[in-house]
Amino acid sequence: MGRLTTHVLDTSSGRPAADLSLQLWRVEGSQARLLTECKTNADGRCDTPLLEGVTMASGVYQLNFAVGDYFLARGISLPTPSFLDDVVIRFGISTPDQHYHVPLLVSPYGYSTYRGS
């Protein structure tokens, strides 16, 4: 059974990014539909998969990570406007029976992602 998960690591502190808000959107042409929202747990993960089973379908998706709010809530001094506020990752699911894992490694001044396992 396929599923979509994410994991956020704060590379500036060397720890999971706990209590970070994120949203999952399905993108169809120029329209986007909000599917779910969550906050990461102490391990930097959502408690349940973002998609799984019948909700896991081929298509284009977008994860919006509220990293600016996350760093401000931790007392990190950021310029105005901050260099990163929302990190948006748009990706495709072509094989919905597989596990898609989209990790985010983030600091106030940079981020990276990849398809994990």
Image (cartoon, grey):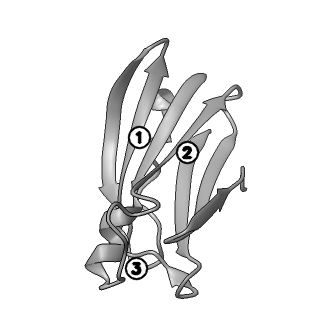
Answer with mark 1 or mark 2, whichever residue precedes in sequence.
2
Mark 3 closeness class: few <14, some 14–19, many ≥20 residues within 10 Å: some
Q: Secondary structure at mark 1?
A: strand
Give 87 or 50, whichever is nearer the viewer: 87
- x, y percentage for residue 18? 39, 76
- Amino acid type of the residue tagged 3 in the rendering: Ala
Image quarter of residue 14:
bottom right
Residue 19 in percent (x, y) is at 32, 71
Q: Residues within 10 Å of mark 1 (few under 14, many from 20)?
A: many
Q: CA distance from mark 2 to mark 3?
A: 19 Å
Q: Quadrant of the C terminus?
A: bottom right
In the rendered view, tell whether residue 18 sits above or below residue 31: below
Q: Earlier in the sequence, mark 2 or mark 3?
A: 2
> How far apart are the two marked residues, 3 and 1, measured between alpha carbons?
20 Å
The N terminus appears in which quarter of the rendering?
A: top right
Look at mark 3 in the image and give the residue it sits on.
Answer: 42
Seen from this angle, which residue lies furthest left?
A: 73
Can I make out residue 57 in this image? no
Q: Residue at x 27, y 77 (%)?
A: 73
Q: Position of residue 105 (x, y in %)?
A: 60, 67
Left or right: 32 with respect to 44?
A: left
Q: Are marks 3 and 1 in contact (CB under 8 Å)?
A: no
- On residue 4, the disc is 2
Residue identified by numbered label 1 = 24
Residue ID at (46%, 61%): 83
